[in-house]
Amino acid sequence: MTSGIFSAVFASNQQVGGCGVAIFSGNTIHGGDASHYYRGKYRFDENNQISGNDRCCQVLNPSGFCLGPLTPFRLILNGHIITNDRAFELSGHVEGQPQLQIRIALNKMEELIEA
């Protein structure tokens, strides 16, 4: 299991992208970008594949998200580790709208501070 602060680069099948941060801690994900914040849970299976779902909520401009003006919504994500626990690639879709697809590249920037 991984933890840390990751850069997140988003690309959708709507030909729009964006970037933000994601914080992995325990089995939770928290993060955000210029228009939305995200929070959810993830897990690794026995083959080191990652899956999870995130609830996404609007902070500012709803049209700023790479999947268009949706809020709130849930992303269903699956992926795999690329380099140890330092890089992930996730792909998925908006729950109930499989035509709205997203790909997220995550790269570890820093460890979390211990309490």
Image (cartoon, rainbow, N blue to C red):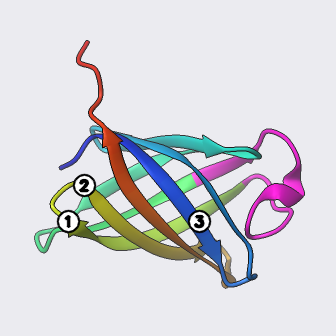
Mark 3 in CB contact with mark 2 (< 8 angstroms): no
Q: Secondary structure at mark 3?
A: strand
Q: CA distance from mark 2 to mark 1?
A: 6 Å
Q: Position of residue 66 (x, y in %)?
A: 73, 67
The amino acid type of the residue labelled 3 equals Phe
Depicted 31 relative to depicted 65: above or below: above
Q: Which residue is mark 1?
A: 83
The secondary structure that most of the magenta stretch takes on is loop
* Residue at figure coordinates x 82%, y 56% from the top left: 64
Mark before the other along the chain sequence, 3 or 2: 3
Q: Which residue is mark 3?
A: 10
The amino acid type of the residue labelled 1 equals Thr
Bounds of the magenta span? Answer: 55-72
* Residue at figure coordinates x 35%, y 43% from the top left: 109
Using the rendered view, name the quadrant where residue 25 is placed: top left
Q: Position of residue 84 (x, y in %)?
A: 15, 60
Q: Position of residue 47 (x, y in %)?
A: 13, 74
Mark 2 in CB contact with mark 1 (< 8 angstroms): yes
Depicted 97 relative to depicted 49: above or below: below
Q: How many marks?
A: 3
* Residue at far left of view: 46
Residue 58 is covered by the magenta coloring: yes
